[in-house]
Image (spheres, grey):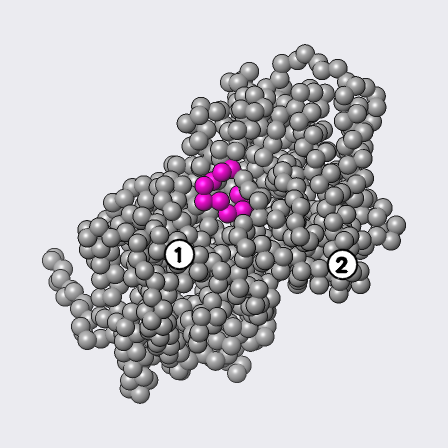
Amino acid sequence: MAALQDILQEFHRIAASPQEQMKHYLAQNKKIVVCSPVYTPEEVIHSMGLLPFGTWGTDMEIKEAKAYFPAFICSVMQSILELGIKGAFDGASAIVIPSLCDSLKCLGQNWKYAVPGIEFVPMTYPQNRNTTYGKEFTKAGYQRVIADLERITGETFEDEKLHKSIEIYNAHNQAMREFSEYAKNYSVITAADRNAVFKSAFFLEKSEHTALINQLLEALKETELADVKKIRIVTSGILADAKELLAILNDNNIQVVADDIAQESRQYRVDCPIAATALDRLAEKFATMNNCSVLYDVNKGRASYLTELVQENKADGIIYALTKFCDPEEFDYVVVKKICEEKEIPLLLIEVDRQMVNYEQVRTAVQTFSEMLG
Amino acid sequence: MGEEAKPKYIPDPNSAKAKLGKIAKEHYDNLWIAKEKGEMIGWCASNFPQEIFQTLGLTVCYPENQAAAIAARGGGGRLCEVAEGEGYSNDICAYARISIAYSQVKDIEEQNMPQPDYLLCCNNICNCMIKWYENLAKELNIPMILIDIPFNPDYKVSKEEIAYVKGQFLDAIRQLEEITGKKWSDEKFEEIMKISNRTSKAWLEATSFCKYNPSPLNGFDLMNHMAVAVCARGTVEAAEAFELLAKEYEESVKNGTSTFRAEEKHRIMFEGIACWPHLRFTATELKSRGINLVATIYADAFGFIYDDFDGLIEAYCNVPNAINLEHARDKRTAIVKNNKVEGLLVHVNRSCKLWSGFMYEMSRQIAEECNVPLSTFDGDQADPRNFSEAQYETRVQALTEIMEANKGVR
Ligand code: SF4
Ligand code: SF4
């Protein structure tokens, strides 16, 4: 048991100290490329010998970024820019920002002037992605990233090396899925633990993270399943990493049994298949990715996917953590709400915001929801 | 005491204004006629390549135009609330909220429009559009075609982007043939491209008269005429009406007349969509200070000039909301300089994340490059609740004072 807690502590330590992690890699002469949400071709960056370092912003007060973003842009974008301006990424060689939503498009444009010391590398994805021309365009987007990174860092790209990185990333995906599957039944894994495992993945080289996950899985396998009745919840949204929120879930006897969170499982659902070149493998992966508010889907498969997650994991309900001002998620919510009503799945909407200080409303809502389910 | 009834203002039926008004009205009338004949109706994004459905002879209408009309006639708040009742956040673009609400309410007094049988979406103005149309498609259970034109981080459109959009174009044609049973004709396509170019040229020509000092037009006119540039670009009537408009402006310049009915003391660029629910207030505040609007990016937004198929695609990739900060800035800087603009009034539009999301930085750069003062105000193009008259007045007054002081110096 001690071992399990030690390993979990390690995940918490890493998740809570991205800047320490950056320093640690910079001290090893690693060149760092910051990766913005929602999807960046980390494999490409990794294969060039660079360290992909993810950021989803942080819970903080926004000051400097206000000169660039009006108040109605989500706090994920605001806080990433704020961190950039305040020097949190100093030492990084570049930042890759995809343009999958309107606010992300603006982050890239503002970045150039707000943080001139760290070069902005755009990643442009197609929305009609699962077509021949769509995949070609995805590849063109990757090639653009490669060319920029070669120029900025002096490192070079080789398809053969990308194959190797893809294997590392596929193995990591697999480990993350396995963890999620395992963790759902262990009441010792709190919502905060689960989040720390996912969050830390952005601050560690992926094979290192996989190794740590495997240790965790080993420790879990040796842990006895406790016979406690928990309220089984599926979470959905862009992120649900606020300390206060995770504590509220814990206080209300909630076990997160699966998630549809962009910062968590959405990253790991799809592996790179076999294809002609390594770059094709990556484009194929993007082509088949789905069930996400920033990826076009006329069938809104995300809503039915969520109900399937509930059924497969015998969940009691869904908590939809809506990041304030995130329009892709705001639109999807209505469709999710409808399908939940039809299928009689309890659904709780809570609004989260990186600048939020008062969680009393959330606490009351979660409490009422869990009492209803409990 | 009985008030004297004001005679209703009827414009000369041969004037461009009357002709444009007629085209806008007939656009809606024709939709109902088509619907009654059993034709399929499409709902279409304002910057969807209209050459496609014009060639196929399809009947489409524009939710953005409708939402603007509804908002201008006072129904914006009511419909936004209907959408909010369904679970839509009040942070979502008000055009989307109004349109989604309308697809459920179906009958309102401000502006009706037939319900759609299919949807034509193009995200060169925003990705919000994709979500809005996805939800409509799901709710109404009808097909949706998306031409994805991504935001271009570079100054120039790449050949890869052209190839990607072209692939979608051809797919869209095939899908639309299947949905509607209509057939594509290359000759018709050539003809439509010609007419569209003619209309666009005439539109650009007419808007270019803002450069005269004083300007022969009140810039707010353009925001109204734009509806025709959106809904009838591929028609000869629209081309003729805009050509006539340009002629009238030319005459006005000669005669020293203007549709701006005040002395033109200051010339500004108005950035962003109009605040439709508060149009009269926002316009009057300017007019009473002798401020005329002589520049807007709208002029450019619907001027699609091209020589061939690739050029057409490139034009749709270069619409104002699809281009990077530097490109967007330079387009505006050119207009500001060319039209002798003396101040920038920037609408920070709560509805439009993309248009407002890098507007602060871009406006600063334009103001600096052109050496003109800049004032921003918070508003919304269709939700009346997100606007404060007091703030607008203060900001306009501040801008006026700097422009006046600058005149004293210059
Ligand atoms: S939280 Fe939503 S709005 Fe913000 S960057 Fe992510 S997807 Fe875009
Ligand atoms: S106002 Fe902005 S967000 Fe709304 S439809 Fe137009 S471009 Fe899109």
Is there a contact, CB below 8 Å, between mark 1 and mark 2? no
Answer left or right for B73 relative to B395. left
Q: Is residue A72 visible?
A: yes
Please state the horizontal and vertical placement of residue B245, each as a whole percent of the image: 29, 77
Kindly identify which chain the residue marked by label 2 belongs to. A
- SS at mark 1 in the image: helix
The rendered magenta stretch, by its main secondary structure, is classed as: loop
Mark 1 vs mark 2: in front: 1
Q: Is residue B193 above or below residue A165?
A: below
Q: Nearer the viewer, residue B237 or B254?
A: B237
Q: Is residue B322 above or below residue B137?
A: below
Answer left or right for B187 relative to A334. left
- SS at mark 2 in the image: loop
Please state the horizontal and vertical placement of residue A164, each as a whole percent of the image: 77, 47
Q: Amino acid at mark 1?
A: Arg
Answer left or right for A304 relative to B209. right
Q: Residue at x 76, y 27 (%)?
A: A217
Q: Which residue is mark 1?
A: B174
Disc 1 Cβ-to-ligand 2 distance below 8 Å: no
Q: Residue at x 74, y 51 (%)?
A: A162
**Quick one: which residue is furthest to the right in this view?**
A28
Residue A295 within the magenta-colored segment of the rendering: yes
Kindly identify which chain the residue marked by label 1 belongs to. B
Residue A157 tag number:
2
Mark 1 vs mark 2, CA separation in Å: 39 Å
Q: Specify the quadrant of the image occupied by residue A216.
A: top right
Q: Residue at x 54, y 21 (%)?
A: A316
Q: Is residue A105 above or below residue A253?
A: below
Q: Residue at x 62, y 53 (%)?
A: A98
The residues colored magenta run A293-302
